[in-house]
């Protein structure tokens, strides 16, 4: 690790990198490294020169041209088949590296100004092989530049990340240590110009560092008021902080007016919670602005909050893709998972959305598949309830996540040693089922949805 103990006055150059994905399947469903680009913006606001390389860049200059507005900004990543990781050799599916060609990455690294510090992020815990490959490529070009790893994998599996990632340092906070990192690794000291606890004070994430902006992720709050057994939000964001409605609308207007962005994806875990003080003022102001934009909710919205008035405002504000956090229709026994919704609330919410003018194809309900002890019949029953409501069932394969309440049950149910290696938490292998969710069974579920 390179560290400078004496104070320096020249401003360091910092490179931020979004790593490759290694998986059986991956697709850009409004997925961007929000945290990493927030740090880039914070550094830039303090006059620190930054550079950014996205290993998942669908619009890399060497990639074939594609329409950034197709599918409202979504689209497939470039991919290349690679060897299965140890322990998953028996899975009869192609394993791939998703993202830009490794040679392109090396060229981009060499073309960048020599950095004084490199920050790498991470997301899904079982995507860590892509993180390892990314860091190895970085250190082959810049062996003497310190590499710091953060992000979800680093925070949920910190011991594993420290042992295997190849990073010089692994950080587990939400960015609070950024200026200390810069000081320790470059010798350059600076004082924060903003209150990091005030979300309205943060600069907008540096999405302008991308080669092309096909959509903008929005985060209007940190944390979640719910405590679902399968979710790690309470561990990653133990508190609940909100941006002001005015600040949220101002950001949307900024990206639309200055960069021509028309598609926005809300990353919030509970966008509609305490709606009277948060979501409703946002929606009303958006309606008043009359911007020709589309909003999408890939992280799902809270069904219980969808009243007739809420549905009308969402339609008028420009919501286009709605995902509902249903998870299961075993309402009588779901208390061990969450307490988010009842059957009548679900049916009523769907009716409100349809009455507001949403097409049934725009509304999808997530259904968890592969929970510990879950049967195929239980999923089939959930699919049937959603289809009878007249909307689309969307299968969400369960990922066992450390530090969640369901983690001990997942470990006990799995045919893999989940605690030993995050690779075994890959939801594509249904790690908490033994024979229940075979590929023929999954194919049958998909056909049931389409019938």
Image (spheres, rainbow, N blue to C red):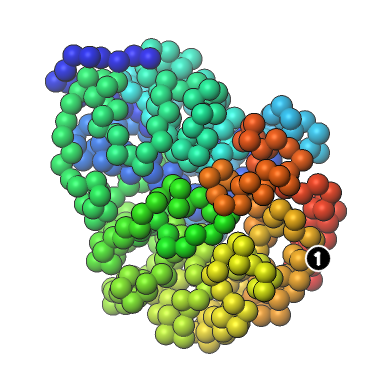
The residue shown at (84%, 49%) is 435
> x%, y% of residue 301?
49, 67
Question: Disc 1 designates what residue?
Answer: 377
Between residues 238 and 326, which one lies in front from this camera angle?
Answer: 238
Q: Quadrant of residue 382?
A: bottom right
As drawn, 311 above or below 279: below
As drawn, 212 above or below 384: above
Q: Quadrant of residue 338?
A: bottom right
Q: What is the quadrant of the N terminus in the image?
A: top left
The residue shown at (77%, 40%) is 415
Q: Residues within 10 Å of mark 1 (few under 14, many from 20)?
A: few
Residue 137 in view in this figure: no
As drawn, 412 above or below 347: above
As drawn, 147 above or below 444: above
Answer with left or right where residue 277 lies relative to residue 325. Answer: left
Q: Quadrant of residue 448?
A: bottom right
Answer with left or right where residue 150 lies relative to residue 357. Answer: left
């Amino acid at each position: 690790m390179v560290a400078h103990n004496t104070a320096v006055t020249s401003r360091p150059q910092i490179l931020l990198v979004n790593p490759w994905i290694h998986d059986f399947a991956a697709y850009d469903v409004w997925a961007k490294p929000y945290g990493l680009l927030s740090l880039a913006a914070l550094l830039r606001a303090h006059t620190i020169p930054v550079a950014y390389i996205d290993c998942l860049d669908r619009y890399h200059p060497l990639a074939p041209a594609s329409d950034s507005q197709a599918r409202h900004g979504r689209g497939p990543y470039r991919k290349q088949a690679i060897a299965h990781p140890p322990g998953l050799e028996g899975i009869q599916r192609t394993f791939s590296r998703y993202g830009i060609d490794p040679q392109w990455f090396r060229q981009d690294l060499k073309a960048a100004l020599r950095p004084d510090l490199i920050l790498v992020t991470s997301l899904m815990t079982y995507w860590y092989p892509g993180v390892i490959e990314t860091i190895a490529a970085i250190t082959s070009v810049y062996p003497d530049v310190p590499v710091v790893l953060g992000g979800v994998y680093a925070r949920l599996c910190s011991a594993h990340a420290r042992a295997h990632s190849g990073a010089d340092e692994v950080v587990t906070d939400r960015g609070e240590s950024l200026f200390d990192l810069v000081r320790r690794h470059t010798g350059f000291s600076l004082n924060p110009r903003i209150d990091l606890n005030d979300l309205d004070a943060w600069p907008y994430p540096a999405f302008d560092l991308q080669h092309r902006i096909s959509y903008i992720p929005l985060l209007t709050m940190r944390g979640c008021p719910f405590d679902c057994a399968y979710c790690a939000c309470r561990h990653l964001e133990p508190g609940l902080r909100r941006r002001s409605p005015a600040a949220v609308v101002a950001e949307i207007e900024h990206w639309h007016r200055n960069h021509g962005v028309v598609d926005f994806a809300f990353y919030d875990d509970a966008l509609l919670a305490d709606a009277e003080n948060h979501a409703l003022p946002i929606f009303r102001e958006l309606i008043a602005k009359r911007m020709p934009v589309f909003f999408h909710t890939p992280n799902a919205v809270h069904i219980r909050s969808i009243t007739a008035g809420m549905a009308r405002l969402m339609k008028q504000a420009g919501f286009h893709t709605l995902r509902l956090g249903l998870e299961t229709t075993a309402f009588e026994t779901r208390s061990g998972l969450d307490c988010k919704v009842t059957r009548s609330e679900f049916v009523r919410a769907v009716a409100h959305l349809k009455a507001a003018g949403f097409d049934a194809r725009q509304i999808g309900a997530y259904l968890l598949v592969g929970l510990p002890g879950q049967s195929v019949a239980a999923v089939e029953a959930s699919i049937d309830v959603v289809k009878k409501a007249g909307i689309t069932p969307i299968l969400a394969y369960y990922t066992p996540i450390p530090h969640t309440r369901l983690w001990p049950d997942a470990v006990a149910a799995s045919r893999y040693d989940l605690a030993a290696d995050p690779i075994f938490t890959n939801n594509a292998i249904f790690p908490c089922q033994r024979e229940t969710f075979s590929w023929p069974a999954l194919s049958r579920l998909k056909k049931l949805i389409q019938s």
